[in-house]
Image (cartoon, rainbow, N blue to C red):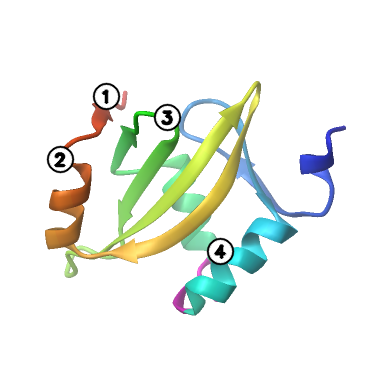
Amino acid sequence: MTSEDEEIEKRGDCFNGTEFIITRRRWLHVLDRHAELAGMTETLEAAASAPDEVFLDPHGTLHMLRRLSRASDDSVVLIARRRRSKTYLLTAYIIGAKRKKRRYGRFKKLQLS
């Protein structure tokens, strides 16, 4: 067990077949910077297991996006890094459609099966 596996807050499935991990430390970071996500752990798990879109940034970090609702253009973004058979959450936040278009226009979009 690595030090990253210590104090796991949540475990789930990731779209890429790995185990999705939210450590206590990273969850506290998300809550500190993006308090609006406090009651949304199920939304984060759904975004990891069945994202609407996934992008890969130049550093190899995954950006998983899932719309919050059909009526909203806002999406939750999970930024995560894969390490062997696990994908670890780095941060999460909500993004609007306009900002999403600007930010993800330059990243590689992955095909979801």
Asked which secondary structure carries label 3, the reply is: loop
Residue name at image x 62 percent, y 44 percent: 12
Q: Is residue 94 left or right of residue 61?
A: left
The mark closer to the camera, 4 or 3, is: 3
The outermost residue toward the front is 59
Looking at the image, do the residues carrying marks 1 and 3 touch, with CB atoms under 8 Å apart?
A: no
Asked which secondary structure carries label 4, the reply is: helix
Which quadrant would residue 62 be assigned to in this image?
Answer: top left
Q: Is residue 28 above or below residue 10?
A: below
Q: Nearer the viewer, residue 49 or 4?
A: 4
SS majority, magenta:
loop
* Neighbourhood count class around disc 4 (C-alpha, 10 Å): few under 14, some 14–19, many 20 upward: some
Q: Which amino acid does the dot numbered 3 rest on?
A: His
Measure the C-alpha gap from mark 4 to mark 3.
26 Å
Assess whether residue 39 is covered by the magenta stretch.
Answer: yes
- Spot occupied by residue 61 in the image (x, y as percentages of width and height): 45, 34
Looking at the image, do the residues carrying marks 4 and 2 touch, with CB atoms under 8 Å apart?
A: no
Q: Is residue 100 above or below residue 57?
A: below
Q: Which amino acid does the dot numbered 4 rest on?
A: Thr
Which quadrant would residue 29 be assigned to in this image?
Answer: bottom right
What is the tally of numbered marks visible in this picture?
4
Q: Which residue is mark 3?
A: 59
Q: Which amino acid does the dot numbered 1 rest on?
A: Gln
Q: Which amino acid does the dot numbered 2 rest on?
A: Gly
Measure the C-alpha gap from mark 1 to mark 2.
15 Å
Asked which secondary structure carries label 2, the reply is: loop
Q: Which mark is residue 111?
A: 1
The stretch of residues the image draws in magenta is 36-40
